[in-house]
Amino acid sequence: MLDVKNLHVEIEGTQILKGIDLSVKPGEVHAIMGPNGSGKSTLAQVISGRDTYDVTGGEITYLGKDMLDMEPDERAREGLFMAFQYPVEIPGVTNSYFLKTGLNEIRKHQGLEPLDAMDFLKHIKEKAKILDISTDMLNRSVNEGFSGGEKKRNEILQMAVLEPKLAIMDETDSGLDIDALRIVSDGVNRLRTKDRAIIVVTHYQRLLNYIVPDYVHILLNGKIVKSGDKNLAIELEEKGYDQIRAEYSDVKAKLEETV
Amino acid sequence: MALAIKENNQLYLSNFETFEKNLNGEAGSWCHDVRRDALRKFDELGFPTTRNEEWKYTNVASIAKENFKHIIQPDFDLVSTNDILRYDYNGLAVHLLVFIDGHFSGKHSSVRDLPDGVKIGSLAEALRADAAAVKQHLTKYARYDDDAFTALNTAFINDGAYIYLSDNALIEKPIHLLFLASGKSEPFVSYPRNLFIAGKHSKATIIETYTGIKNNRYFTNAVTEVFVDENAHIEHHKVQEESSEAYHVSTIQTYQMANSNFVSNAIDFGGLIVRNNPRATLDAEGVESTLNGLYLGTGSQLIDNHTTIDHAKPHCNSHELYKGVLDGSARGVFNGKIFVRLDAQKTDAKQTNQALLLSDGASIDTKPQLEIFADDVKCTHGATIGQLDEEALFYLQTRGIQRDMARDILTYAFASDVIDRIKIKELRDYCHQRVLVKLQQDRLEGIDKE
Ligand SMILES: Nc1ncnc2c1ncn2[C@@H]1O[C@H](COP(=O)(O)OP(=O)(O)O)[C@@H](O)[C@H]1O
Ligand SMILES: [Mg+2]
């Protein structure tokens, strides 16, 4: 479904991603773990099409298409979704209008009839109920004045409404208390299907107690240094990033020689 | 460069002579003395150049140099029922006064079943029929000693809207004043002069619309005076949709008495060069005064708003929110003057000006101008100029929304902030729709250019 090959990314001349390889198939849940500044958000944003990053090498294919050629909205219409680490506040645009517009653009692309206001409301209420999320925020401006937890829940609600094929969740767990974390991860678990792939980006192992991944990748300094199953997350939790960093400093040194 | 352009003064002086001859015996009145005085003043001032601080960013040389014809005898048949119906604001029930090239057209207007104590009609008629009230207020508020355009309008006072609300008069239905420019190909000028008198505890909603039926060149030079007596409440809306070749200069001078409330929402869509001077004088305690504006400039439009709020007495509040959206090579000017006189303690004045520049060619000059002589006051002002938020655009795009649409959504949200303050739903919907149409128009024009 998603194939990232030898991806190199720079921002303002600084190299951030230094050759990422990642292959995701339908139904899989991948966790990408890494300390602050390792490049997790960069990877998520580049896959989503943010153009402030320069892709200087490598490729991304999605459903057999060269993704780097696609606008962010095209990617979304093809079933990609990213839950933002820092969801953007958009004053004056109501959440429901925003979501309805997005959903209908995606539906049009899929050859489906756009939903009218009534049907949309029904659709969104259904999703909110499954996720145990209140619909109060629908009539408010997108993320404006939302608490950290509300913003994250709003991302999950959007994901549920837009029904993506591939969802990337960028630190959806950060800043959540244990109850909010449970709501968010229960939501994600309900959205797990055999056709839908999910990439969970996180700093902490904590979230992976709730969303159990099929694969875990450790991202250090712009490079995936180790991949494994869910046990890798536990190993990481025990050792901490420092020890992992030390273990891989050799790798890093070698890498830098070759660059 | 000189401070003034006077090369066309002779044209206006001779226009005045013709105008005077057509006044049929009214030439001896008090009003005519004021006209003559204003003409003298105009002759002395001439049209301002950009050396004049008040006109620094707005070059009116093209107005000063054009040979505008002054229309004394309008041809009402140049305007069809459909031209009027375009401005029925989604079927909003109103009392309608229609003015064509500055002259009241009874056959296009409809004013029915007025409540007690309310008079709505033409100023030309009121100058005869309601002479005492008119004399008490007309030309008493809009100063022309330092303003060539107001002087010119005053020199040519003849017709416009007259609204009189006696004490305690309440009128539910909005009053719609529709100023239409006919499609004459020869450039012409009109001088609408409006007078609204709101008695104590009276209440009304007034909509002014300025528009043209063709894309022809003409000049609207309008002055509106509003007297708001104690505890009166006036909601005022102005929709400016002049033709894309037209010049529009307008002054609305409000004079407010104790505990009165005046709210104005002015929306500028049209015109080639537009200059608005909304001015409010708060001359008693407990006054609330609100001046809001939204301007959308595209192509080579220039839209200049010079607001003035004069806090003359204590315990008054004023609120200003001006928002501009500028695309193409459009220019905007915002100058917000707030005077707080020595006597005006406990003044609370708030001014916000925000401009959104959608293209590299668009620009805005903005300046708050606070002159505060009292010490116990609260005055805040903020100005922001910016582009669309890239983060927000990206966010919308990641939800499947195309970039163009995302731009429209964000621009629309920015503009809606002012439109949403219009309490009349039908008019609000019209303005929302109009913003969308204008945004789309721009994009089509943009595509044409590529
Ligand atoms: N806009 C930017 N300009 C310069 N450097 C940036 C920018 N965004 C991110 N970086 C840098 O890129 C690196 C990776 O950042 P990021 O992808 O946000 O990491 P993570 O999400 O893993 O915390 C960091 O060193 C960060 O400082
Ligand atoms: Mg991050």
Image: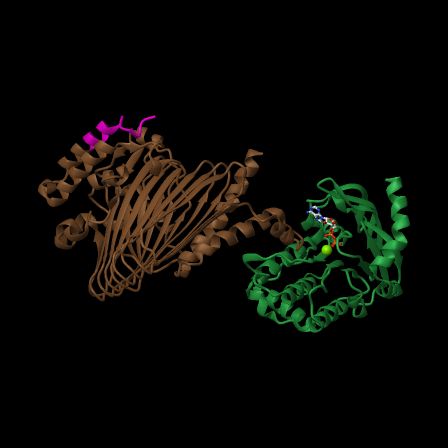
Name the quarter where the C terminus of chain B is drawn.
Answer: top right
On the rendering, which quadrant does ligand 2 occupy? bottom right
Instruction: Give the colour scheme shown.
Output: by chain
How far across and down, in percent of the image, does residue A158 sit? 66, 62
How far across and down, in percent of the image, does residue A181 sit? 72, 70
Magenta stretch encompasses residue A71: no
Quadrant in which residue B56 is drawn: top left
Query: Can you see residue A18?
Result: yes
How far across and down, in percent of the image, does residue A226 sit? 88, 55
Picture residue at 11% right of the left edge, 45% below the top: B30
Quadrant in which residue B245 is drawn: top left
From this view, report whether residue B85 is shown above or below residue B212.
below
Q: Which residues are magenta?
A: B1-15
Picture residue at 23% right of the left edge, 60% below the top: B229
Picture residue at 21% right of the left edge, 38% below the top: B72
Q: How many marks?
A: 0
**Which chain is depicted brown?**
B
Quadrant in which residue A241 is drawn: bottom right
Name the quarter where the N terminus of chain B is drawn.
Answer: top left
- The reply, left or right, for residue B112 in relation to residue B386 is left
Residue furthest front as drawn: B375
Asked whether B249 or A226 is in front, the reply is A226
- The reply, left or right, for residue B432 in relation to residue B128 is right
Picture residue at 89% right of the left edge, 40% below the top: A258
Chain A: its colour in the image is: green
How far across and down, in percent of the image, does residue B381 sit? 43, 52
Asked whether B204 or A117 is in front, the reply is B204
